[in-house]
Amino acid sequence: MPLTLDSPLNTVPDLPTRMVKALEKEGVTTVKDVLLWMPFRHEDRARTDPSGFQASEIPVCHQVIVTKAGTKYFGKRRGAGTFEAQVEPAGDSLMGGQLMTLRWWNMPFMSRVIAEGQRLIIYGKIKDWKGRLSIDHPEYEVIEDEEGSTIHSGRITPVYRLKAGVAQKTLRTATWYVVQALGDDFIQDLLPRPSEKGEFAGWSRARSLKVVHFAETMEDLEKARRYLALEEFYSYQLRVVRRRRAVMESGGHAHVAGPLVQDFEKALPFEMTGAQKRSLLEIQRDMASNAPMNRLLHGDVGSGKTVVAFASMLGAVESGRQAALMAPTQILAEQHFQTARKWLEPLGLNVALRTGTRAEEGGVELFTKKMSDKNQIVIGTHALLHDEDLVKNLGLVVIDEQHKFGVAQRAKLIQKGNTPDVLVMTATPIPRTLTLTIYGDLDVSTLDERPKERGKIITKVRPTSKQADAAKFLREQLEEGRQGYIVYPLIEESEKLDVTAAKKGYEEWSKLLPHFTVGLLHGKLSAEEKDLVMRDFRAAKIDVLVSTTVIEVGVDVPNSTVMFINHAERYGLAQLHQLRGRIGRGEHTSYCVLFVADKDDEAKSRLAILEETTDGFRISEEDLKRRGPGDVMGKAQSGAAPLKFAELLADTRLVRLARQLAEKSLDADPLLRSPRFAEIRPFVFQDDTSQAMMQ
Ligand code: ADP
Ligand code: MG
């Protein structure tokens, strides 16, 4: 009987019984359990240097015999010794006589693992110190028999991230025999067969799953990984496209913009940028159609998303429906409210603010300022979602800083309402390569042009010890009538400690700047207190605002030209860029100083890009390079797909191919929700956070 995914391990030919037992003890009992345990990297152990041990910058693999082993102690403190094993090349005597030392520092238990006479496979960088060759902390495996040596060396070897109790070699041996025994069609393809030509000609799911463990060449390995990544992206895109089509078909309303929008534009104190006009047109086109809009307005901090949002809202109002703008925080909702009143009330529109807090599970408290049935424009926080009447009559909802809202909330809104048009705004400058994945179910408009008449921002990374100079500089700016922010950091996610640091900072700066008014803003203040502080700051009654990161999003005080960020090393580039976006919003040149610990050269070099550019897209590309797409995505939108092959996400070609295949599959079968997904789920999406995306 041929081996299947569900075959128990004791039916795998040649797999030693003791290994089956060892794996069973850890709950690894079937072929599937082994096969779907992906290696997290491979070592090219095919590259054994035949000329023997040689110093090299790249790690190499050798099979060796241990000729001597023991622990050396230095100084008086016993226990903190170095375990050393002297080895010579195993096998042919061609290079006999060559010796090398393997060293493990502070790992006394090594004396119980490695002993004279053993055969080892080692992997690491060989150092040459005055002719003496050594490797510190090599990867190693003890080889018990000749056969084992062909599985674990002389080839491209998979390395697995292990759970307790499973040994590397045991798992690899099991995978080896499983892969040998499985036929060519033990598993169905998920993907519609990619074309007979193309990159994946000749590849199948079965082949990829085998090759991703044991590959003959690095090229094959890469192809197998890409194939599996394509599968993964495909199943993700299937959900995205299905969801997108469902929204499109759920019936919306046509909202046609009329003269109000022109009046609005004329009354603005500035001319909209080309990008703003283009985005507005794209939005209006969507809104005018009967299908519901589902669009992302994507623009760097300060690119002027708010104006576009308000102009869009007028389209709904002119069609006799209400429009809502939902902000992630109270402060922002209030700021938008003030802007709306300034710009929209003169047009004769009725603007309301609605914020509130969820008192506890089940109970919703709303406090409402100035509310009536005929509010055409409603601004608020997520409390808006609980107003059934409003939600029913919504023509358009704009969601600001959408990463603070979950996909689920968005879905809820669409369900409850009469399928309003949805415009999502984000200032997280996601690299273009990732938008298709992160926002695959949205159409995207990008504000890639900054409003002119904008002062520039000069950014410097400085050691904390230079704060005294900085204080002097700040004083000069304040004397010229400018304002500033001093940001106290994130302390390990603890809001309480943040507040303490900010309070202390507030006291220090109050002393340093005796002739100026220093304000304090943090998350522990009540909504009213925060509002008061922000209002005073905006009215320039406060000169310097000491704050935690609560000012992160959207706050707009153009007269603020200085920002000091303490412990800048604790932030990601994107977050610093967002914070910095609070300055440089007026006509004056602005200054951002990022303070890092005095000797932190790593932080200095990481943050250097912020000195070079204020282009959020460039910064996010840099972030992407440094941290990989998985992390960038994680920050951009928690709940986005945690992908096993995330590093390939930057590969636009692959993501696009996945998208095309998904569109094609759904064209052929609009209800495609194959049970086959259940099968790949545990292997592809392992994270709970993915559940939100699975619906
Ligand atoms: P963000 O995209 O970060 O939300 P805002 O919408 O808050 O940016 O706009 C930032 C500032 O720029 C606001 O003060 C806004 O009035 C101003 N602004 C927006 N568009 C323009 C423009 N085309 N020309 C000049 N100033 C603009
Ligand atoms: Mg904004």
Image: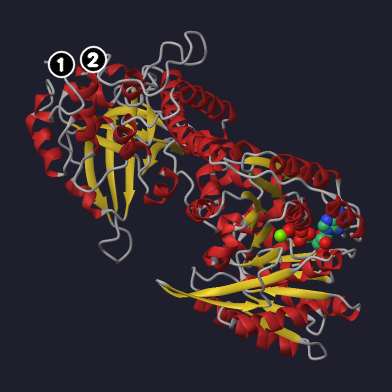
Question: What residue is at 64 percent from the left and 42 percent from the top?
Answer: 431
Compared to residue 289, the image places residue 207 above or below, namely above
Q: Residues within 10 Å of mark 1 (few under 14, many from 20)?
A: few
Q: Secondary structure at mark 2?
A: loop
Q: Which mark identifies residue 2?
A: 1
Q: Residues within 10 Å of mark 2 (few under 14, many from 20)?
A: some
Q: Position of residue 210 (x, y in %)?
A: 31, 22
Q: Nearer the viewer, residue 221 or 541?
A: 541
Compared to residue 131, the image places residue 514 above or below, namely below
Q: Secondary structure at mark 1?
A: loop
- Do tag 2 and tag 1 residues touch (Cβ < 8 Å)? yes
Q: State the image quarter where residue 480 is shown.
A: bottom right
Could you tell me if residue 544 is visible in this image? no
The residue carrying mark 2 has its beta carbon less than 8 Å from ligand 1: no
Q: Where's the C terminus, which quadrant?
A: top left
Q: Nearer the viewer, residue 400 or 346?
A: 346
Q: Which mark identifies residue 183?
A: 2
Question: What residue is at 84 percent from the left and 55 percent from the top?
Answer: 260
| Residue type of the residue flagged with mark 1 | Pro
Question: What residue is at 70 percent from the left and 84 percent from the top?
Answer: 532
Question: What residue is at 62 percent from the left and 49 percent from the top?
Answer: 422
Q: Position of residue 287 (x, y in %)?
A: 70, 44
Q: State the image quarter where residue 457 is shown.
A: bottom right
List the single residue furthest toward the top. Answer: 196
Total numbered circles: 2
Q: Where's the N terminus, which quadrant?
A: top left
The residue carrying mark 1 has its beta carbon less than 8 Å from ligand 1: no
| Residue type of the residue flagged with mark 2 | Gly
